[in-house]
Image: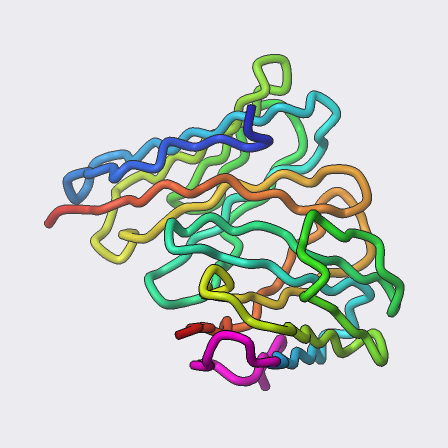
């Protein structure tokens, strides 16, 4: 069973479109994240939710809107896609904060905006 | 100053040698430190975590933490070609915010 699963794995779309990426974890974790990894492999946090509540919102354009219907799901909706949004988006989850909290990552969604 | 800094490499090491990967962080209050490995086209996977000063060993891997110098490293002994990957240093800040360095690309040459 896949612990953290994202769909789709690949997404190619035109500028200006709206798209969503879905994420689900079956680990019983309380916290979920969205990370963006650019072409230089830099992995940057975008959002973090704890039990459906937004706890971290980095400097991300308003076009990006996360939604957590329950603590096992964290979806990412992107409006008016731009070329610069092309990247790999990773969903991750972890247990509630403690010193050795490990984040488990999904397989990533490679978004290409043309 | 970046929150977590790594030498992006590439770092080339002969098979069987020790690979040494370094990371510095800016927030002196950081408590937990992680090393992730990422193969090309794959997701990051945890290798080790450390939160006490000193060394922590797990098989061929040793993590070293020096909080006074704000420095954490990863040593890989008896390097194998399968160790070739990008290694990401990560630091927990504040409310469970896991911040990553830019990663070091490691190549083990047979």
The answer to whether residue A28 is left or right of residue B15 is right
Please state which of residues A93 and A11 is positioned toward the viewer in this rendering.
Answer: A11
The residue depicted at 43 percent of the width and 32 percent of the height is B6
The residue depicted at 81 percent of the width and 44 percent of the height is B95
The answer to whether residue A6 is left or right of residue A86 is right
- Residue B11, how many percent across, how many down? 25, 37
Q: Is residue A65 above or below residue B68?
A: below
State which quarter of the image contains the N terminus of chain A.
bottom right
- Residue B13, how many percent across, how many down? 19, 38
Label total for image: 0
The answer to whether residue B72 is left or right of residue B7 is right
The residue depicted at 31 percent of the width and 39 percent of the height is B77
Q: Residue furthest left?
A: B110
Q: Residue furthest front?
A: A16
- Residue A56, how many percent across, how many down? 78, 51
Please state which of residues A33 and B30 is positioned toward the viewer in this rendering.
Answer: A33
Q: Residue furthest top?
A: B68
Q: Quadrant of residue A114?
A: bottom left
What is the basis of the colouring in this image?
rainbow
The answer to whether residue A34 is left or right of residue B82 is right
Q: Is residue B69 magenta?
A: no
Q: Is residue A13 above or below residue A38?
A: below
Q: Is residue A24 above or below residue B68?
A: below
Q: Which residues are magenta?
A: A1-18
């Amino acid at each position: 069973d896949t612990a953290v699963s994202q769909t789709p794995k690949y997404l190619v779309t035109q500028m200006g479109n709206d798209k969503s990426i879905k994420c689900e974890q079956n680990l019983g974790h309380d916290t979920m994240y969205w990370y963006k990894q650019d072409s230089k492999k830099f992995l940057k946090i975008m959002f973090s939710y704890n039990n459906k509540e937004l706890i971290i919102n980095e400097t991300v354009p308003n076009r990006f809107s996360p939604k957590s219907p329950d603590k096992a799901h964290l979806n990412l909706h992107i409006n008016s896609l731009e070329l610069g949004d092309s990247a790999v988006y990773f969903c991750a989850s972890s247990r509630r904060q403690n010193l050795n909290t490990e984040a488990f990552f999904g397989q990533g969604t490679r978004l290409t905006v043309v | 100053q970046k929150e977590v800094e790594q030498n992006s490499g590439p770092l080339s090491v002969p098979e069987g040698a020790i690979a040494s990967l370094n990371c510095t962080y800016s927030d002196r209050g950081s408590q937990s430190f992680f090393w992730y490995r990422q193969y090309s086209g794959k997701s990051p996977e945890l290798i080790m975590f450390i939160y006490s000063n000193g060394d922590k060993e797990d098989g061929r891997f040793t993590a070293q933490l020096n909080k006074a110098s704000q420095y954490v490293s990863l040593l890989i002994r008896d390097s194998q070609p399968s160790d070739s990957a990008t290694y990401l240093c990560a630091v927990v800040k504040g409310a469970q915010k896991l911040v990553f360095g830019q990663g070091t690309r490691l190549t083990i040459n047979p």
